[in-house]
Amino acid sequence: MIIDILSLFPHYFTGPFDESIIKRAKENGLAEIRLTDIRDFSENRHRKVDDRPYGGGPGMVMMAEPVVNAIRHVKTSEAHVVYLSPQGKVLTAAKSRQLSKEKHLILLCGHYEGIDQRILDLEVDEEISIGDYVLTNGCLAAIVLVDAVLRFVPGVLGHEHAADEDSFENGILDCPHYTRPEVFEGLAVPTVLLGGNHKEIANWRKDQALKKTMNTRPDLLKFIIKD
Ligand code: 4FV
């Protein structure tokens, strides 16, 4: 998978993609992440990329020209252009799995108050939010999306089906996990997990996951109950 990330702070990405699983995915040729500075596509001599909003109001807006130029510079026939913004549909595991099937993802990071609407009209296929809160910088959202998507690319995670056992994969939260020691500060591991009866263990885990979901994310259950 090729991922082009367009932003005003390409150095923002130094670090998150140079460690652990994402680093290995790049080394194994499962992912190629390319960083583009939108300012390099500004056609005015001051490399200006933002301007005041028509109609007044606070802050600045990203100009259409440098952004559209940058998108068209990296665009291929297989490209799927995603704009990260609070106005987008909130990212889910299902959407991450869907995006993991794309050959070429172009991620546009928002900055300032937002971008000129004509960029969306002309070049953006999809608008995605990582959550209902406002970040200082859209680069963070791109990092989250890249991480969530690459986990579904075959070969990126240690064992093949790890992502299939994730939270949300069956629409509910994950069950509690335990490892050695068997007793920690007086708290013992549930005996069912020590009994080796895989059926009993699976039932316990399902039951615990449902309880956790009911307590923490009852909103997830409405999808389950409906199906
Ligand atoms: C955001 C989000 C987000 C908005 C103002 C960057 C910021 C600044 N992006 N999901 N939530 N972006 O808050 O994706 O432009």
Image (tube, grey):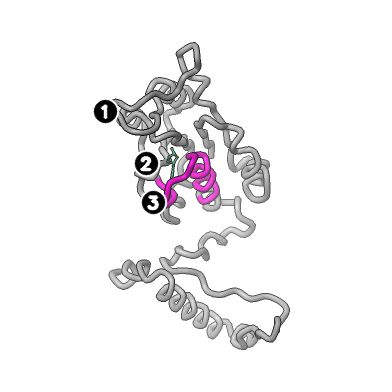
Whole-percent x, y for residue 102 in the image: 46, 41
Whole-percent x, y for residue 97 in the image: 46, 52
For the residues labelled 2 and 3, the Cα–Cα distance comes to 9 Å
Q: Are marks 1 and 2 in contact (CB under 8 Å)?
A: no
In the picture, measured across the screen, residue 212 lies left or right of residue 177, that is left
> Can you tell me whether the CB of the residue at mark 1 lies under 8 Å from the nearest atom of ligand 1?
no
Is 147 included in the stretch rendered in magenta? yes
Which secondary structure lies at badge 3? strand
Residue that label 2 marks: 127
For the residues labelled 1 and 3, the Cα–Cα distance comes to 28 Å
Residue that label 3 marks: 90
Give the mark, 1 or 2, whose residue is nearer the N terminus: 1
Q: Quadrant of the C terminus?
A: bottom left
Q: Residues within 10 Å of mark 1 (few under 14, many from 20)?
A: few
- As shown in the figure, which amino acid type bears the numbered disc 2? Glu
- Start and end of the magenta stretch? 129-148
For the residues labelled 1 and 2, the Cα–Cα distance comes to 24 Å
Residue 182 drawn above or below residue 152 = below
Q: Residue at x 60, y 43 (%)?
A: 30
Q: Which mark is residue 55?
A: 1
Which label sits in the foreground, 1 or 2? Answer: 1
Q: Residue at x 50, y 31 (%)?
A: 6
Q: Which mark is residue 203?
A: none
The quadrant where residue 17 appears:
top right
Q: Residue at x 61, y 55 (%)?
A: 157
Q: For this rendering, which residue is in front, 224 or 121?
A: 121
In the picture, measured across the screen, residue 196 lies left or right of residue 223, that is right
